Amino acid sequence: MRNIKAGIVATLTAFALAACSTVGGSASPSAAPDGGGGGDGDGGKKVAFVSQVEGVPYFSAFKQGATETAKSLGMSYTQAGPATADATEQVRIFNSLVQQGYAAIAVSPLDPRSMNPAIAAARKKGIVVITSDADAPDSERQVFVQQATDAALGATVMDQIAAKMGGQGEYGIVSGAADTQTFNSWVAEARKRQEAAYPKMQLVGGVRYTTDTAQALKEAQDLMTANPDLKGLIAVPSTAVPGVAQAVQNAGKAGQIAVSGFGSPKTARTYVESGAMTSTVLWDVPQLGILTVWAMKQLLDGKQIAADNTVPGLKQPVKYDAGDKTLVLGPPMVFTKSNIAQFDY
């Protein structure tokens, strides 16, 4: 998820209820930052990532790749985030890491507007700050580590339902919060793809905005009721994916209505394997963690990031756009019944 997270990311609230805020609060030992009390220990320079929500499979997978890479580069890695999608708490955690003297901090902003001043303050102190998974484009961040381009993500998810629909018929979109820039960008790109490549397809019911899985289920049900000829549904964030898929399953229309979206394999697996979902679209999350730590290391070492980069641990070269300071992991991944069981996030 950029804001998925992100996310976007996993079914955030559901998985995070038992998690604790991990910096400056009463976190459980298992949720404490990797850097302990902020000491360097044997890990060299301290680097950190502030997730959107800790304790969910998506960001746990990110941590796996990031931790291994930091160790190989001789750095100490900390990952922290709020227990639920709370932008105010995320800023507090970020500021706590700044106060602890971390050399570099990456963040997946829930609300760029509230994070921007914190990023500016950290940069004034000489701390390397980048965004990853979600961006704060108007901030003073130095690099944005992007999972895949918005255009590629939107086109891929539209191609998935269009193939099942035969390129024609009515479809609906169930998105996340209406003011989430990332989700809106993905929706806009999906609609562009439909209008350019599938003119016989028609969006019905407008874009439905939701805040959780239960609301996504209701919106999908309402779309199916109001549009009995509906042939496809796109679920934008991971919180919407299970709700939309469950609605299709409850209606007995699994396999009749094409469903795809931006859900983690673990979130979508049950529905993909049952046939309620055609596919889910995402990216290799551990590799996003690898690239994020590598980018922080480049900046800490004062290196310019090249247009094309070979990154240890990644299977393909990574491109950097100096114009908007964006480092793109690569094309989206599509998870279907044939491969979804191979991924545990």
Image (spheres, helix red, strand yellow):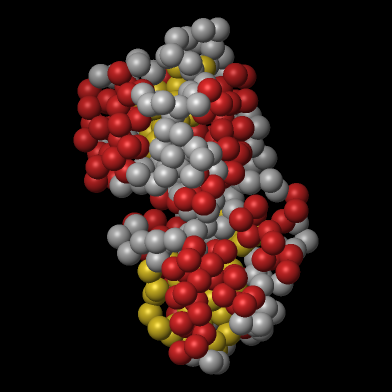
Q: Residue at 55%, 64% (x, y): give it.
A: 241
Q: Residue at 44%, 61% (x, y): give it.
A: 212
In the figure, 4 relative to 195: above or below?
Answer: above
x then y, percent, for residue 229: 55, 92
Task: Please give left or right for residue 46 compared with residue 90 in the image.
Answer: right
Name the quadrant containing residue 192: bottom left
Q: Residue at 50%, 44% (x, y): give it.
A: 16
In front of the other: 57 or 334: 57
Q: Residue at 41%, 38% (x, y): give it.
A: 82
Q: Is residue 298 visible?
A: no
**Residue that protrudes farthest toward the top in the picture:** 42
Q: Is residue 249 visible?
A: yes
x then y, percent, for residue 21: 42, 33
x then y, percent, for residue 209: 38, 69
In front of the other: 181 or 209: 209
x then y, percent, for residue 51: 44, 38
In front of the other: 21 or 191: 21
In the figure, 284 relative to 294: above or below?
Answer: below
In the figure, 131 relative to 181: above or below?
Answer: above
**Residue that protrudes farthest toward the right in the picture:** 338
In front of the other: 344 or 157: 344
Badge count: 0
In the figure, 190 relative to 137: above or below?
Answer: below
Task: Please give left or right for residue 134 compared with residue 136 in the image.
Answer: right
